Amino acid sequence: MRREPPRALADYAPLFFPALMLIVFFVVPFSIMIAVSFFKRNPAGFYTPDFVFDNYARFLTTFFGSVLGFSLLLAILVAVCCVVIAFPFTYLLTKRSRAVQTVWLVGLLSVLSLSEVIIGFAWSTLFSRTAGITNLFVAIGLMKEPVALLPSFWAVLTGMVYQALPYTILVLYPALVRLDPTLLEAARTLGASPVRAFFNVVTPALRNTIVATLIMVFVFALGSYLLPQILGRPSNWTLSVLITDQAIYQSNMPFAAAMAVFLVLISLALVGLTLLAGRKESAL
Amino acid sequence: MPGLSINSITKRFGDFAAVDDISLSVPDGKFVCLLGPSGCGKTTLLRMIAGLEEPTGGAIVLDGDDITRVPTHKRNLGMVFQSLALFPHLTVGENIAYALRIRGASKEEQRKRVDELLAMIHLPDFANRPVAKLSGGQRQRVAIARALALSPKLFLLDEPLSALDAKLREAMQVELRQLQQRLGITTIVVTHDQREAMTMADLVVVMGKGKILQAASPIEIYRKPADAFVADFIGITNLLPAETDKAGRTTVLGAAVPGVALPSGSAKATISIRPEDIHFSKPGAGAIPGTVSFVRDLGGTVETFVEAGGTTIVAVATPRERPNVSVGQAIGVVLPPESCVVLQP
Amino acid sequence: MNVLRRLYFVLVALFLAAPLIVVAGVSVNQKQELTFPPKGFSLAWYGQIFNDPEWRLALIHSVTLAICSAAIAVAIALPLAWFLWRRIAPWANIFQVLGLAPFILPPVITALGFLSFWATVGLFGQFYTAIISHAIFFVTLPLVTLSLGFASIDRSLVEAASTMGADDRTVLKTVVLPLILPYLVSGFAFAFVLSLNEYIVAYMTIGFTTETLPIKIFNALRYGYTPTMAAVSIFFVTVAALVFGAIAYFGDIRRLLGAMSSDS
Ligand SMILES: Nc1ncnc2c1ncn2[C@@H]1O[C@H](COP(=O)(O)OP(=O)(O)O)[C@@H](O)[C@H]1O
Ligand SMILES: [Mg+2]
């Protein structure tokens, strides 16, 4: 068997089904969504075909501006928190035995695969008055009586960091596990303490990885659609929540679609940046 | 016409010719070694014979049939890869039976043939072992047995022994050669180890930079290397400058070597002489004057390094033949004319 | 230093486990109330998942959806990954990008795309639309594991098979598929677990007509808490941990997650 370009029609055969599925059920829906973003709302059905920019024009309101600003800031905050916690953690994890790493990876994957609904429910329970963590504080005498810690911005932030942390660790894991150990050993033989070696050698060597991870976690956090709703006040709602809300509860699909297109553009721009950062890293 | 014939085969990767217009004919039942330094195109040539690489130009003819465009799986080959390529998901027996199984041979037939082949490679009762549990030498044998399962027309091996340690490698060389002679199968082995080639081959093909430099029997290659590259690559040799003096005699480092003629029209050339062909004498008397600079006594042989005329000449003899040579001693180096090979410039 | 490191691991573990511990506690409450530490002990709420008709129906929907969509995702990913490995066709990488995109984009967007699509073609609300949507949404996972799997196949194995007379189809059947099987199973398992947990795509495709477990939990959340929700959550974590544990046990999860080769 030689690896060569496909020639006969039969050579292309394996591609038919995947290509068909991906085009019909991903490219087409995506295109329809873009088209819908220019349609008019139809309160009785989904939409009426049209070509208007009204849906995009609505972005120019201060309400929308503040939601967008809040979404971006929240996502940045989540990304920073996650990378700050995850980077040293992942580094230490890669230094542990294979068995320990495997157990952690299984745990992290299990948490990562958790439904956002379940994460929201779990944290709303943990932050509740009746079953929450404040009961523990009362029990050890830190507080007089249990209180509800939600809805609040901090609850939203905690929930989203919880959701994104396993993702961050798993994104960082390949880069850190493949890090050349001689790099660190060299620094150690020159007299650097482990902590100094970590900050002076590992961190700079992986600067681009860190930037790429920040961007990926940022995009991931932008996608959070339920946690702000379950754990926060309406003022803590993000663009993703708003899209869900408009599409389902307000039955305004064209506006939801316009916001989605806008969100895609932001995400794409950032994924593009990630790839660029990745390319620079490998070119080094 | 039985045998393998390669006609003007070329393989280019982009602008680079890995195999450059090679022609070679291998008579039926012969054992051929493709020998050359790393990167000279040996593997590429072997892979084209196997159909794993498509030639850019030329033809490959097996037993009179042009097989250049025949896909690999229809060529009836046995091939042993450098990595051995044993199937990790199959046992030893299943690996060996693979070619029979995919042709729909019965279980009974497969088992019989596997037993035969395992006996041939001296690994009886290994059929049910996983390949991961084998030693390097055992894997080697299993790969050979697997390739021979269908008694192919052509047996190809790419550096089959390079992963083994030196002792095992020498033993396997002998074993492989005996096996090939017993089966009478046309065999082509790629190697970069000249000792291996000398041990096994009927025909040694020395390659360099995508071309054949010399194709001949091992002893002829050793005795009559075609050029300085071959002479240097095969064994150890002394390459010495020769010139024609005013009297028309051929001289090497100032000493006349009667009976050696340079190619007509050239006043200068290089001669090759093997270390074991060099004699020593008292200084003067027509010998090359030199000084012993180092003596390496290996027990079985003694290597003497002599500084003469700005180069180092190496001579080898048994300790009995050359009992008392010491460093710093002034001696004469004698080159027997019948042992001097004048190389193409 | 060692103490600090240990403390760090413990803190991260605690952060990841805390909500689950509380939920696990809540799930064994004797009465129908949400208290922690639990009052009394009862596994009745776990029984509810299987006994209560509504929860059981949601469970059946979820499992059906997860199995079917994971199977289709693998059916899309396998030939695609095989083609990309088998042929030299750089242009075909566009399909790889298409396969990765749904997973990288914010899920709301993919979900809304499906909603627009099924609404436009008039099939909105049919159960199989969720299956297809999930298959596309999660095709990334088998695609990644299978690409890794193909990359790990030593090409000389395939060449060896062809020198022994195997044509393309035979090579696929006797060499490639057996070697790729662990990666195929992992890809299926990843897609299965994620589909089981997925909310937004399922909601935007069939949420008005059918309840999967995550949809049921969310709907229940809005009408008041019951310990069954907690039981279902723990049930989900357990399933995920078992599946990933099995992958780790039978395969090499570190390699799947990007550690170089199995010997590092
Ligand atoms: N697929 C390929 N693409 C580009 N260059 C190749 C390829 N295969 C081999 N070469 C080049 O062809 C030359 C000969 O390679 P090879 O036949 O493997 O040499 P050998 O086996 O003698 O060491 C080398 O310079 C190698 O880099
Ligand atoms: Mg080679």
Image (spheres, coloured by chain):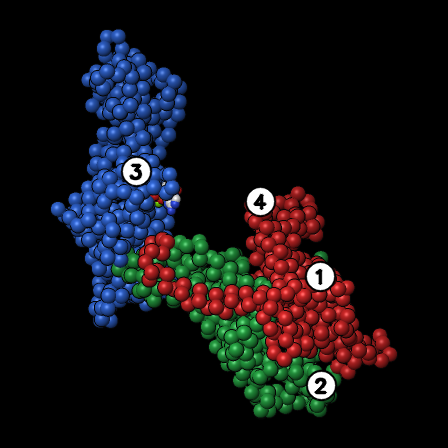
Chain colours: A red, B blue, C green
Tell me whether circle 4 and circle 1 mark residues in contact (CB < 8 Å): no
Q: Read off the residue under disc 2.
A: C224
> Within 10 Å of the Cα at label 2, are there few (<14), some (14-19), or many (20+) other Cα atoms?
few
Q: Read off the residue under disc 1.
A: A72
| Label 1: chain letter | A
Residue at 63%, 76% in the rendered image: A42
Structural distance between the alpha carbons of marks 4 and 3:
36 Å
Q: Quadrant of residue A229?
A: bottom right
Q: Read off the residue under disc 4.
A: A284
SS class, disc 1: helix
Residues at marks 4 and 1 on the same chain = yes
Is C32 located above or below residue B166 in the figure? below
Q: Amino acid at mark 4?
A: Leu
Structural distance between the alpha carbons of marks 4 and 1:
31 Å
Residue at 22%, 60% in the rendered image: B150
Tell me whether circle 2 and circle 3 mark residues in contact (CB < 8 Å): no
Residue B183 locus on image (x, y percent): 18, 53
Structural distance between the alpha carbons of marks 1 and 3:
61 Å
Q: Amino acid at mark 1?
A: Leu
Is A231 located above or below residue B144 in the figure? below
Residue at 75%, 81% in the rendered image: A131
Q: Residue furthest left?
A: B1
Residue C45 locus on image (x, y percent): 64, 88
